Image (tube, rainbow, N blue to C red):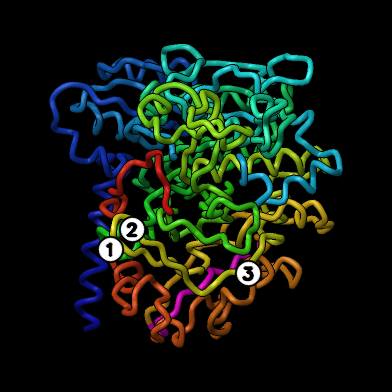
Amino acid sequence: MTKYLALSIALLAPIAMFAQHNGSGKLSPDLQNKQTHQGSVRVIVQFKHPLNSSHQAKIRARGGVVEAELGIVKGMAASLPASALAILARDADVAYISLDRPLKSTSIDVAAPSVYAPYLWNLGYDGTGIGVAIIDSGVHLVDDLKDAAGRSRVVYQQDFTGGNSDDAYGHGTHVAGIIAGNGKYSTCSSCKMLIRGVAPAATLVNLRALDKNGAGNDSSVIGAINQAIALKSKYNIRVLNLSLGRPIYESYTLDPLCQAVEKAWQAGIVVVVAAGNDGRDNSKGTDGYGTINAPANDPMVIAVGAMNTHGTPDRSDDTVTSYSSKGPSTIDHIVKPDIVAPGNQIVSLEQGYLKSAYPNNRVPNSFYQTTTGSTLSDKYFVLSGTSMAAGAVSGVIADLLEAHSALTPDQVKASLMKTASKSFPAFSTVVDSGVTYTSQYDVFTIGAGYIDAQAALDDSSLANLPATSPTAYFDSASGNVYFLYDQNALWGSNALWGSSTIWGANAFVGSSNLSGTNALWGSNALWGSNALWGSNTVDGFNALWGSNALWGSASGAQTQSLSVDIDGEN
């Protein structure tokens, strides 16, 4: 056996050297099979050093056309002949080349009360003075997004799609209403309900990166992120909302979209990202585990899953939605989502294509007015998804930052996770179209718990280490899953910020029986019949932790593009 092992190592070395020499290691997995294609491919080329004129020259010398400079990731969006990919990859100054990938949107009567936002409002914290940048399909200028004097709180607009900054799709306006709608349309003599966003006085920066169909590319989103950073001081942008995503194709350390959100985080902007709506995906036998989208997989950002409020402001009946994407992330195994928030059948502003395409999602006037008529509202309608949940979290953060303006992004994330409610049932079920979906309440489904704005505001502890989401590790010898210990992150620091404090003692089944690691799921939970992985067998567990598709291979990333869940669940 020793001889065979030595031979295997000897063979691996020259293969790795060849990959480095021919540049194939610098091509993203989804570019590998495009090198022999005819015509051009739209790509993002990341360089090792800050951009200069020589970088454009390198692309043009290989028949490419530079579409946009993406200085935030030391990259350029370009159209390049497929035959030139390998040649450019061999350039010593090229760090990585990936497809300019498509993204889609993920898709407040009960949202604000469910996160305890009224507690902050009563203390005078409503997001005043805090700028929230929304990278989405645009924001339509409506009365609910104006101030008391009738001036628009959308203080800046820019389009990155080649059109204009208005919202022809409707998704961005709906998210904007969840974040910062002030309820103007539902304030009237005949109104019985105020449909208000979580931070109703926050200012908004509209950076449109998704087109009239709710779709865009990495480069358009990266360009918008770069502009948010550039405008941070001018508009006091403290929060960046990304209710969008796409599949994961490589490590977050290489993905230009993830690198861009990290730059925003490092610039002092709290980045909130929708986790994805693929929690029902069992195409790989994982019962929806391993379906987190990018850039929610980046360990710096706050990835948000969706809760179902069941139409009431009382949290006691709330359950996690069956479609909310579950961790861990593919390739890197990052523990996600970080927290959950209301996201199912959320009422907010209506606009554009969605309101005409889904007329049944328009709420009747009687929903918020004292009328018995059946006339549908032309102001509000319903959408569901982790997009809506992300918007709710962005609103909470705007309120918190008004109260505690000195908080860093890591301190905000740590506090939200530490104070999140951790009281959940062991599992819940929902029946949709005759199919029963079972959700387990583990860290890969609900993260650190249900966001609680009141508890977060009252939390006086300040994190002094990075709040990067941890990495999960499967130990094949013991059959258990563990957190990798990181002395430079909060979760491994002390009792105040230890893992059981952040995720709750009930999330940890097993003990710290490996040196330098904290057990997530011990053998009793794995081999019991408590349906830890969504079924009464261990098939889902084996598929998730033992499959090459989810651990180190891009083939595991071929999930469906994240899209708006129009109807939600019951």
Question: Are the residues flagged by discs 2 and 1 in contact, CB closer than 8 Å?
Answer: yes
Residue 378 in the image, given as x and y percentages of width and height: 51, 23
Name which residue type carries label 2. Answer: Gly
Question: Are the residues flagged by discs 3 and 1 in contact, CB closer than 8 Å?
Answer: no
Element carrying mark 2: loop
Tag 2: Cα neighbours inside 10 Å, few (<14), some, or many (≥20)?
A: some
Judged by depth in the image, the label closer to the viewer, 3 or 1, is: 3
Name which residue type carries label 1. Answer: Asn
Query: On the image, which quarter does residue 288 sit in?
Result: bottom left
Image disc number at residue 552: 2
- The numbered mark, 3 or 2, whose residue comes first in the sequence reads 3
Name which residue type carries label 3. Answer: Ser
Q: Does the magenta stretch include residue 382?
A: no
Query: On the image, which quarter does residue 81 sit in?
Result: top left
Q: What stretch is highlighted in magenta?
A: 477-488
Task: Name the residue rendered at 41%, 48% in the picture.
Answer: 277
Residue 415 in the image, given as x and y percentages of width and height: 72, 55
Residue to which mark 1 is pinned: 548
Element carrying mark 3: loop
Task: Name the residue rendered at 19%, 34% in the picture.
Answer: 34
